[in-house]
Amino acid sequence: MTTAQTQELDVQPTPLALLLLGREADPKSERGVECPGDLPSPSDPDLVERARKAKEKLGDKVFVLGHHYQRDEVIQFADVTGDSFKLARDAAARPEAEYIVFCGVHFMAESADILTSDDQKVVLPDLAAGCSMADMATAEQVAECWDVLTEAGIAEQVVPVSYMNSSADIKAFTGKHGGTICTSSNAKRALDWAFEQGEKVLFLPDQHLGRNTAVRDMGMSLEDCVLYNPHKPNGGLTAEELRAAKMILWRGHCSVHGRFSLDSVNDVRERIPGVNVLVHPECKHEVVAAADYVGSTEYIIKALEAAPAGSKWAIGTELNLVRRLANRFAPEGKEIVFLDKTVCFCSTMNRIDLPHLVWALESLAEGNLVNRIEVDKETEAFAKLALERMLALP
């Protein structure tokens, strides 16, 4: 409908519609961790009660894992919470649980299946809960990249290091080619190990974690890093550029953390004098360089637990976690706000909602196995090899 037609019918767009179209601003959206167009209130009490009854009926047969980025209505039913690797290890430590219900995303459930026994069955409540970062590196693309490195004469010098946020196929590729997995907590240790094995690293699939670790934590320069784009011939790089590089970064990123900008940091410092800026290492290099503290989700939580009362914090990570922390520490007088003014929920993580969780739990309680995540044996073997190398890091 044109503007003229709208005026003719005397129809005016609502303020919220204008906001969503980017034509207006709402000052109330800049008050920390709240936002206009907020998520609906937690699902109706019937669903909460149904989830409770189904979980109670299953008893020790089920173990529910909840990632930090899950919404509150789901996280309340988690037996343990944490980041992806911690949760996968927690699942492996519960061999008596027949069912592992992973409230997270697909690659996390794959990792849990790799680390648990054959008798345990991993369930993802919604199969559409994927990860945009993990999807940015496919097995075919990475195999083609290895061919490019081989043609450049450097493949034998390259050790792959893959972030935990990758598919089982990519983990298996890493294990098969002598590499290791890393988390955002141990990325430096993984890179130190890799450079003891070879002269160069192929870092998959998050360019920002790779770059930030190499430059910020290991003293390399930005010139030591090149960006391999799987959508361009030869990754968009010459053989000479590949030979000169120490870090070959895959062109992947987190769609949530990639949205934070240097302007976000500058703006929050202007609005909140004395604020501490704490960001995840998946953020862009300029954001990490401008922050006061940088660390994984577990690091962020521990930093806020140790923070003095009355301190002010702007957090650059997923909004569900930031809101939960803001509410948790408000009684201690800690002011915690979201780094950006724009809503930044992880859309795929939020696909695991209470209706899907209820369906999965009730199905299992009735003896029906649904949405099982199962990694084939060959992929599992090589992926587990890469994970075991990480576990053996000093």
Image: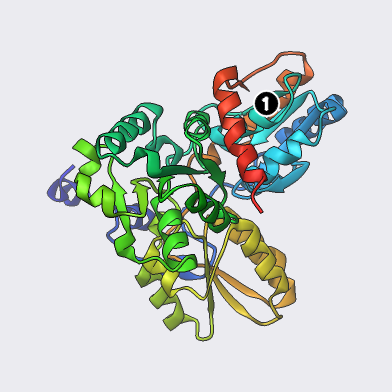
- Residue nearer the viewer, 166 or 216: 216
Q: Looking at the picture, how far across and down is residue 15, in whole percent?
A: 36, 58
Give the residue displayed 33% in from the left and 60% down from the top: 224
Which residue of the protein is positioned furthest toward the left in this rendering? 4
Which residue of the protein is positioned furthest toward the bottom in this rendering? 273
- Residue nearer the viewer, 346 or 149: 149
User: Residue 376, can we see it?
Assistant: no
Q: Is residue 339 above or below residue 157?
A: below
Q: Is residue 387 left or right of residue 341?
A: right
Q: Quadrant of residue 149?
A: top left
Give the residue displayed 60% in from the left and 18% down from the top: 377
Q: Is residue 376 left or right of residue 112?
A: left
Q: Looking at the picture, how far across and down is residue 250, in whole percent?
A: 36, 45
Q: Looking at the picture, how far across and down is residue 62, in whole percent?
A: 79, 28
State the residue position of label 1. Answer: 122
- Location of the N terminus by quadrant is top left
- Location of the C terminus by quadrant is bottom right
Question: Tag count in the figure?
Answer: 1
- Residue nearer the viewer, 121 or 151: 151
Q: Residues within 10 Å of mark 1 (few under 14, many from 20)?
A: many
Residue flagged by tag 1: what amino acid is it? Val
Q: Secondary structure at mark 1?
A: strand
